[in-house]
Image (spheres, rainbow, N blue to C red):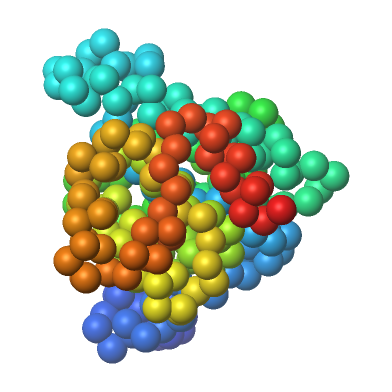
Amino acid sequence: MTSPPKAYENIPFLNSDPCRPVRLQLEYLHPETTMEEQGIKSTIVLFGSARIPSPEIAADCANEKLAGLVPYYEEARKLAGIVSTTCQTNHECEYVIITGGGGGIMEAGNRGAEEIGCKSISLNITLPHEQEPNPYVTPELTFEFRYFHMRKMHFLSRAKAVCIFPGGFGTFDELFEALTLIQTGKIDPMPVILFGSEHWKRLVDWDYLAECGLISPKDLDLLTFCDTAEDAWKAITNYYA
């Protein structure tokens, strides 16, 4: 007689609806435990579109406007290099770059760290059509999530700054969740840096929100607009000076 499978080895059971609380706990514990073991003390979050092409493939992009966003890829890559070079010395793991692990801006962030021999964190998400981990992720710090809200929690749990590059619905979701949590005091204040002053001011009329009384005028101080990696790094270091 074949022995029945142990509960923790029974994959169909673990994927069943009654085991949702167990899966949620695992999605909290696995990244948290691993980051503690790896000595990750703090992070710099890079959010942005998976669709922005790298310079190597920009020429093949059919959408000219999308291809024109390549400089943002390069600035994300540069920022990751600056942050990692400065903070991952003598085995210290402060300000480790953390991305969603996919292509575009996420790839640029992991790439910038990898190119100088530094680690970075990747929080991937299981989706029907995208996304696969990019080739620059640090394998031991790459995690796959089933639940968006658990992934978001890990993005911000060690964050010291959030850098937002141009992106679509997902990027907007991540931006406004971070702003809401800071505004309501659910997480500590930190720099929220919008890369591309003209881009973001065209997308959202921030002053109009304050004029209408929908946000407080002081809420505008939560935002920092930058156009270069150097300016972003200066904003972060000045904030914590």
Which residue is drawn at the image coordinates 58% and 64% (left, top)?
Answer: 158
**Quarter-wise, where is residue 150 in the image?**
bottom left
**Location of residue 144 in the rendering, given as x and y in whole percent from the top left corner:** 41, 57
- Is residue 219 visible in this depiction of the protein? yes
- Residue 17, image x and y in percent? 24, 83
**Residue sitting at 32 percent across and 70 percent down?**
216
The spot of residue 169 in percent (x, y) is 20, 52
Q: Is residue 51 left or right of residue 97?
A: left
Q: Residue at x 57, y 45 (%)?
A: 235
| Horizontal arrangement in the rendering, residue 51 relative to residue 220 (left or right) | left
Residue found at x 54% / y 35%: 231
The percent position of residue 71, horizontal first and vertical second, equals 38, 22
- Position above or below: 239 against 111: below
**Number of on-image labels:** 0
Q: Is residue 9 left or right of residue 241?
A: left
Residue 172 against residue 36 in the figure, above or below: above
Taking depth in this image into account, of 229 and 223 the one nearest to the observer is 223
